[in-house]
Amino acid sequence: MPRSLTIQRTTVPTFERENYFQRLRTSKIHYTAANCRFWVFEESALSGAFIEFTEADDETTLTVAHSNAPHRMLDPTRVYHETEIA
């Protein structure tokens, strides 16, 4: 079964940055325990513009992890599946 991924974009004002990073640490612990991988990237040219990626080996694992997450995603139903390139 192909891997599944969700993506969330977030813009964080400078004064909220530390709170955001605390939320990321909590999310990383949660998703790791739920057998998911969690990455966050910040745009080089725009401080505070982040993209969060959550990946699992299957959609069910990802969906369950999002439903139990300590912080809700804006749209956890938008799941991307790894596509085979022939």
Image: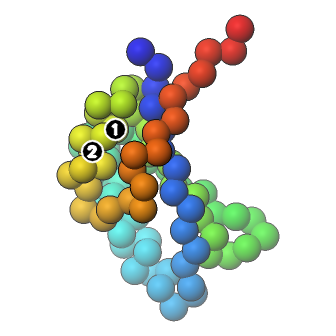
Q: Nearer the viewer, residue 81 or 22?
A: 81
Picture colour scheme = rainbow
Q: Position of residue 73 (x, y in %)?
A: 39, 59
Relative placement, left or right, of 63 versus 83 is left
Q: Position of residue 22 (x, y in %)?
A: 36, 72
| Disc 1/disc 2 C-alpha distance (Å) | 5 Å
- Which image quarter holds the N terminus? top left
Q: Position of residue 17 (x, y in %)?
A: 50, 81
Residue lying at 34% horizontally and 38% vertically, measured from the top left: 62
Q: Quadrant of residue 64?
A: top left
Residue lying at 69% horizontally and 15% vertically, measured from the top left: 85
Residue lying at 30% horizontally and 49% vertically, measured from the top left: 66
Q: Which residue is mark 2?
A: 65
Relative placement, left or right, of 35 versus 3 is left
Relative placement, left or right, of 72 versus 41 is left
Above/below status of 22 relative to 77: below
Q: Residue furthest bottom?
A: 15
Q: Which residue is mark 1?
A: 62
